[in-house]
Image (tube, rainbow, N blue to C red):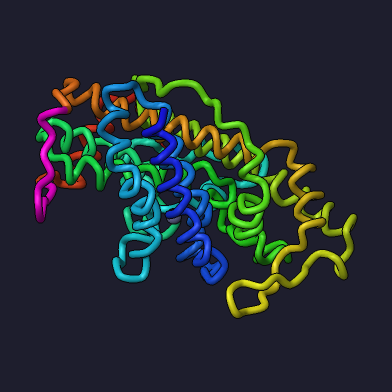
Amino acid sequence: MANLFNYKRLSLFFTLLFLGLLFTRSQTKQAASWGFAGHQRINEFAIYLLPAELQAVFIQHLPYLVSQSVAPDQRRYAVEQEAARHYIDLDHYYSKGQDPFWNLPQNWQEAIDCHTEDTLQAYGIVPWHVVRMKYRLQKAFEELNLSLVLKYAAEIGHYIADAHVPLHTTENYNGQLTNQYGIHGLWESRLIELQAENYNYWIGKAKYLPSVPKEIWAAVRSSHAALDSVLKFERQASILVGPAEKYSYEQRGSTLTKVYARKFCEVYHKSLNGMVERRLRAAILMVSSVWYTAWVDAGQPNLSQLKLEANSKTKNSDEDTIQKTSSRWKQRSCH
Ligand SMILES: [Zn+2]
């Protein structure tokens, strides 16, 4: 318990370290996702749900897993392909009244055949990328390569977390199409900043997932189902609080920054009726479960044999891993 306490203090340090960056982030699509504090919290709490054997290894590297939870966002400007891995604009694929997934094969190759890879990349690939990362993580376990295990574990935590955000499933990702500009940061950063300490983190234990693809697509479906409420309740809260009280100014270091006012956030958060907490908890459970599943699917290698390796490189081919994944899983036909 004493160890756990020390680790929690360490992670608090990292959280505070990054909190300062939270409000200087751009709210553009290229940078926004859960906020740094949200991603760090998700990776940290995912560690606590792991079975003891795996947790013992991960907790030793808690500061790394927490700090690297935001690495995918940090490289979005440096790596051309990175941005598309964080979202999927489902509304591109269906019209009002249709099932969002009716024309979207969840099998990567089928989706390419149906829509072309350029289209998929243009509208986001987060669920497919999670599947690809799970195979990379599994391979790293098989090769007993601790450096890669930690890298992929930290980063898959990020992508899974993004898939749990309703505004990561729409072209209207920042309310720009409905005159609600800024809602992205409001939902996933400002509300987290004000409310996350009050959430319940007794989530249970990591579960083995027979099909990671099925789970990640279910997560995306739930996120998208919550989208209407995210937008609707913001509109209602705006009317209730009124434009004069919707925003306020808070000191961030030496800068006075315009923020969503606390009162407005309280009204909005209350009307969401626990949604942010539910999505956060679901993300934590899935991150932990995918880590655990990758280890089990790797044949539960003896974790004491994992080795840190300098300059590790993955031998996996991205496309191979996606193909392998897809063939194991029931496919949806293209319309
Ligand atoms: Zn992201």
Up the image or down, 186 lies above or below 42; here it is below
Residue 313 belongs to magenta span = yes
Residue at 28% x, 32% y: name it: 326
Residue 284 higher or lower than 293, as above or below: below
Q: As displayed, is residue 26 above or below residue 71?
A: below
Residues 177 and 115: in front is 177
Q: Examine the structure image and report whether residue 236 is included in the region drawn in magenta.
A: no
At horizontal 28% and vertical 27% (from top left) the residue drawn is: 54
On the picture, is 113 further left or further right than 29?
left
**Residue 170 in view here:** yes
**Does residue 307 appear left or right of residue 217 in this picture?**
left
Pinpoint residue 68: horizontal percent, then vertical percent.
34, 53
Q: To which quarter of the image does residue 286 belong?
A: top left
Point out the image quarter for the N terminus: top left
Q: Is residue 258 above or below residue 107?
A: below
The residue drawn where x is 56% and y is 31% is 201
Q: Quadrant of ligand 1?
A: bottom left
* Left or right side of 122 for 321: left
Span colored in magenta: 304-314
| Residue 316, position as x, y percentages in the image | 13, 44
Would residue 246 appear left or right of 100 to someone viewing this image? right
- Decide which of 225, 268 is in the foreground and name it: 268
Percent of width and height locating residue 46: 42, 34
**Can see residue 129?**
no
Quadrant of image for the C terminus: top left
Most foreground residue, 204 or 112: 204
Task: Give the residue displayed 34% in from the left and 21% down from the top.
Answer: 51
In the displayed image of the protein, which residue is found farthest to the front? 2
Where residue 299 sits in the image (x, y, percent)? 17, 21
